[in-house]
Image (spheres, rainbow, N blue to C red):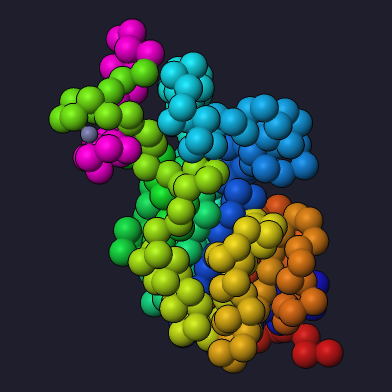
Amino acid sequence: MDNRLATAREWVAQSRRVVALTGAGISTESGIPDFRGPQGLWTKNPKAEKLSDIRYYMADPEVRRLAWQQRVAHPAWQARPNPGHLALVSLEKSGRLHALVTQNIDGLHQAAGNSPDKVVEVHGTMHEVVCMSCDWRGPMQATLDRVRAGEEDPACKSCGGILKSATISFGQALIPEVIDRALKAAQEADLLLAIGTSLNVYPVAGAVPLAKSAGAKVVILNAQPTPMDEMADAVLRGAIGEVLPRLVKGKPARDISRA
Ligand SMILES: [Zn+2]
């Protein structure tokens, strides 16, 4: 084990209030593409981004039709949690996970076994639908069944309004209470662990400097450099499913070199 990982592992073992901040990188290892990453659909084809832009979505039935087709075919429905997700379940079971703030909408943290009350989904969830007119919410799969049965743009059964996944689209406001909860948790952390996130998306990325200035150690695990690497106490590379289990599992090793 290299020294940085060993040192970071010791910090995690000594922490009592770890806040994990996860992004697309932890889910790509479960087969869910990172739409914004270097190989992402939106990066390669900016027009695809229209499907996730609330202005086009509300204005254009054709955009909604395509968006529903994408939801039906989304790889998340077949995805399973990977060892990275399971490592965060271990962390919670050890009593050291204060909060799990995620930018992901796929529900894989809950599927892995993290308590729903620990998970803060800052970009919402694709497992529910919401009516844009009356705020009705319901399970996604029941609405996808309507799409599979031939409704191209299923309307709200209560009011006839436009339905959408309960996620935060481009052009749509974040939910202040959710963001406040995420940032408050970061300020209460004794260690902030940023995993698979490019830390480019605010205000959530602001959790890192908030935690740091409140005295937390900051550990970043991401495939690419992030704008906050210089602020971090340790920056780790490598596959999340390999590195994260080694980072969070087990007691602090006695054989760690303190060199
Ligand atoms: Zn409605």
Q: Residue at coordinates 38% horizontally, 13% vertically from top-left?
A: 152
| Image quarter hosting the C terminus | bottom right
| Image quarter hosting the N terminus | bottom right
Q: Is residue 111 magenta?
A: no
| Residue 120 located left or right of residue 257 | left
Q: Is residue 138 magenta?
A: yes
Location of residue 137 in the rendering, given as x and y in whole percent from the top left corner? 24, 40
The answer to whether 94 is drawn above or below residue 28 in the figure is below
How many numbered dots are placed on residues in this image? 0
| Residue 119 located left or right of residue 250 | left
Location of residue 43 in the rendering, given as x and y in whole percent from the top left corner? 74, 36
Of residues 234 and 209, the one drawn nearer to the viewer in this rendering: 209
Location of residue 103 in the rendering, given as x and y in whole percent from the top left corner? 52, 54
The magenta span reads: 129-152
The answer to whether 17 is drawn above or below residue 137 in the figure is below
Whether residue 68 appears in this view of the structure is yes
Of residues 112 and 213, the one drawn nearer to the viewer in this rendering: 213
Q: Residue at coordinates 40% horizontally, 64% vertically from top-left?
A: 176
The residue lying furthest to the top in this view is: 150
Q: Picture quarter containing residue 38?
A: top right
